[in-house]
Image: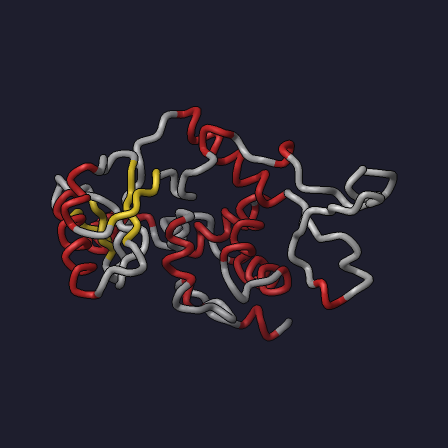
Amino acid sequence: MSKEKKVVLNELADLPHYKAEYTAQLADMGIKTLPDLKKALRSKEKAKKIVDDLVGVGPKIMANWKELLEDIPDTEEKALAPASGKKVAEKAKEDVEIVEQSETEIVEKDGYVVKRKPELDEETKKLLALRYEMSHDRIAFLRQEWFRFPRLGEKWRRPRGMHSKMRRHIQYRPNVVSIGYRGPAKVRCLHPSGFQEVMVWNPDQLDKVDPKVQAVRVGGSVGFKKRQAIEKKADELGIRVLNRTG
């Protein structure tokens, strides 16, 4: 029996190579417990998203987690005796409490605040999912003869030579950036969460923001004191700030 299987897993933090910042990232994906992670790893798309989003987690670590989670029950209720069902329900109420019904903001016991989500129609949700798949399947565009001259680097530049075979798409030459690789037009400028981004530089500009479909990003030239005032007013109006200070 390998040493990895001897690891006792009671929570996500017990996994090998697990970092504290993974908790918030996994929570955004709906993964808060070991059974949730086990279920997510069964899906090829979710497993790929976990590897892409968690810095430091590669296929080997993912395979190790999947092996360790084989002995974990699919639900937390199965791991306990049937008579302790009430205790499970009471513990769930302790772990999650609703703060201000008007805010509809959920705060977990460890202090993590679930971020606000936009009100989207079904078509927009499908297009966002499609855009995510297209962006992850899109090839890497490399400039002409990048493999021949290391000094050129791997940044994209459009081929301009009059005799350029790449510009004319001849035979096996690399793909060129073109309109066919773009994502859906309806969700092209939306934040990954689905919000429309609105730049603000002072608290007064928040009055024109619709918190249902828009989120604000504080300008980089805004000082710390004014930034705090913007975040405080945004919390009062129920507006999500995409680049909060804390």
Q: Nearer the viewer, residue 153 or 58?
A: 153
Q: Please report the residue visible at 27 percent of the width from the left and 58 percent of the height from the top.
A: 244
Foreground residue among 236 and 34:
236
In which quadrant of the rendered view does residue 145 lie? Answer: bottom right
| Residue 83 in sight here | no
- Considering every residue shown, the one lying at the far bottom of the view is 3
Question: What colouring style does the render use?
Answer: secondary structure
Residue at x-position 50% and y-position 29%: 185
Q: In this view, does 13 lie to the left or right of 103?
A: right
Q: Position of residue 115 (x, y in %)?
A: 29, 48
Quarter that holds the N terminus: bottom right
Q: Could you tell me which residue is drawn at 40 percent across and 65 percent down?
A: 21
* 20 w.r.t. 161: above or below: below
User: Residue extending furthest right?
Assistant: 171
Res. 21 visible in picture: yes
Q: Give the residue displayed 15% in from the left and 40% down from the top.
A: 207
> How many numbered markers are drawn?
0
Q: In this view, does 76 lie above or below 111?
A: above
The percent position of residue 239, horizontal first and vertical second, equals 22, 44
On the rendered structure, is 188 left or right of 142? Answer: left
Looking at the figure, which quarter contains the C terminus?
bottom left
Instruction: Judge whether 6 appears above or below 189 on screen.
Output: below
Using residue 127 as the reference point, say whether residue 202 is left or right of it: left
Position of residue 79 measured from the top left corner of the image (x, y, whole percent): 40, 54
Measuring from the top left, give residue 236's x and y in whole percent. 12, 47
In the image, 23: left or right of 8?
Answer: left
